[in-house]
Every structure is written in C-alpha cells, then in structure tokens.
Amino acid sequence: MTEDTIKHVTITEDGDSARNNVPAEILEKKPVEPNQSDCCGNGCSLCVFDIYKQDLEIWKKECLDYMRGTTGKFKEESIISKYAYRSFTLSKITRLTDDTSLYRFTVPNYGCLSLDTAQHLVLRASYDGQVITRQYTVISHAESYGYFDLLIKTYPKGKMSRYISSLREGDAVEFRGPFGEFSYRRNQFKSLLLLAAGTGIAPMIQVVRTIVDDEDDETVVRLLYGTQTYNSIYLREEISKLKGYWNISVLYCLSQENERLKAGYGEEIHFGQIDEQLLNDELKKFRHIPHVLLCGPQSFNTRFLTFLKTTTQQTTWFVF
C-alpha cells in the first residue's frame, strides 16, 4: 500500500468510518496487536510485530477495495502475494499422529507457488471474534502443481490450533507470502548439520530435497531429528528415501522411547533428547566444520544457539 493510497484514508485504526460501508466479515479481520510476550526476542526476520503492521495495512486496503468495488480483482498470474491474502481450498487432511496432520490445499488452475527453498506462508484466521496469524513452511515439492502441503501440529489451548481443528475438507483458508531469508546455492557449504525438533522438520525436508534434486550438489548433510517416540517421527517414509543418497545421513533422537525398540533397517537411533554433548560429538565427526541449521520450539532454538555461540569452533548457523 503506497503512501498516496493511505494518505487521508477513510479507514481509521479502529475502522469507525468504514462501519457503514464494509460488511462485518471484512471488519472482523482487523488484526490484533501482539503482546510483548508474543515476541521471542531472537531477531526473527519476520517478527510477530512485523506481521501485525503488514496485516493492518492489508486490512485497510481490503476495506478500501470493498468500498471501491475492486475486491478480488487480482492479476491472473498472481497466485500468491506478500501484500494481500489469497484464499485456497483445503482439499485433503491426512492425520499423522493424534495432534499432527498434513493439510493439502488446492492451487487454482493447476498453478504452482514456485517457492524458494524453505520459504513459508502466513495463514490468517478469524476465530472467536479474533484475528490470528501463524507462519507455516510449505513441505510439498517446490515444483508441485495444483496443490501445496503444510505440516501442522495442534495444541489443546492454542488459538490457531482451535481454528485448524475446526477445518474440514472444502473450507477456504487465507494465506499470503512467501517469506523467508534463508538462501541456498549449490555447494555453498561443504557440510550441513541440521537440528530439528517436531514439526521443525518442515524446512529441513525442503533443504535436503534441494540438495538431492541437484546431481551436481555434493554437500554432505547430517540431520539430527528430535521427537518423543519412534511413531511420532513425522514424514519418516520420505526421510528414509532421502537418506538413501550417499551424502545424506539421519540420526533420530527419541526422548521417550523404549530402548528395546526395533527400528527400521539402516536407521540410526539415539535414545534420549538432543543435548549439548550429543551436538558436540556430532560436530567433531565432520571433516569440514559444518554450517548449522536449527528449527524447533523457541526453547530448542535458543538452547543450541547459545551453545553454538560459545563453542570454540568457527561454526556458522541459521535459525528458521
């Protein structure tokens, strides 16, 4: 939204001047300003406060578009946009565990999102009279046509989780994007060490796919993937295929699993959570100091980022 567009705009911060002109379903999408406690403090490239400011401008524009009669008039080639929400139909829900499912959304006209490696989208929802947003990494292949997939875990008390749990196949869901400052080029690093916990596997899958899809990329990748149990390993079938490549290896770190577990053929299992000792041992195994990628809960990222900052090795890293 340009400065000229919002100058003397009739949509105020509270939306009062638009109430007689704009329907309730649009007015109700006005974003709620986050609390200071909602910010993780890790200097994310797209902070919750950044999303709020962007969404506030988008909401103003949506109100103006309605009053001008231009709602929904987008360029045909604009499948997804950073600056406006688009609706996508939920076509399939595949339950993976009791609290995690794979959600497939249809891209109109057999289109392709054409995302870069490990980019994510912002989902906007209205639930219980409140507008909420969350960021999700697309896990389907970058060249998937006609659909995209998201891996989403729900929590009993989560606001977005209650909305996600209410979704049914055929529902329309709003997204904008893509976002993400991670960039990758062939053989950029000799070695990568990936630390993932839970649904933090999503961007890691994209990174590994990018490498194995390029026959000229010889980057050596080691993935440490932390979950509670063997059955809570998300996307295990695809991970098994990826680790079949000569330069990809995976260590499953199971914090609550019985040590008598019979794992799959060729699978490496560590009984226990990822910790500083394990990370230090893994770092020592590399011939070349690896670039480290981290994705997990805030506490997970903060814990190992602190460790990496204090290690004597010249390790570099990126946090999703």
Image: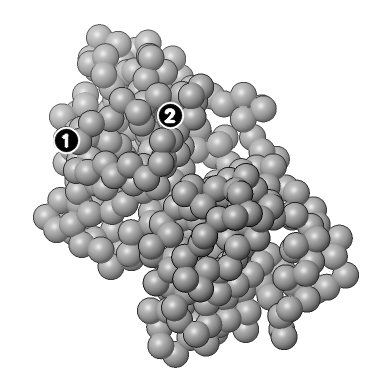
Asked whether 122 or 269 is in front, the reply is: 269
Mark 1 highlights which residue? 170
Q: Residue at x 25, y 63 (%)?
A: 144
Q: Position of residue 214 (x, y in %)?
A: 40, 83
Which of the two labelled residues, at mark 2 and mark 1, occupies the earlier sequence position?
Answer: 2
Q: Residue at x 38, y 54 (%)?
A: 138
Q: Where is 124 relative to 238, above or below?
A: above
Question: Which residue appears at 58% of the width and 68% of the height?
Answer: 268
For residue 289, side relative to residue 191 (left or right): right
Q: What amino acid type should be assigned to the residue bearing mark 1?
A: Gly
Extreme residue toward the front, this view: 260
Residue on which disc 2 sits = 161
Residue kind at label 2, given as amino acid type: Ser
Please name whichever residue, 282 or 6, is drawn nearer the observer in this view of the structure.
282
Residue 58 lies in quadrant: top left
Neighbours of disc 2 within 10 Å: few (<14), some (14-19), many (20+): some
Residue density around tag 1, few if under 14, some if 14–19, many if 20 or more, within 10 Å: few
Q: Is residue 132 visible?
A: no
Relative to 19, say whether 297 is above or below: below
Quadrant the C terminus occupies: bottom right
The vertical placement of 83 against 304, above or below, is above
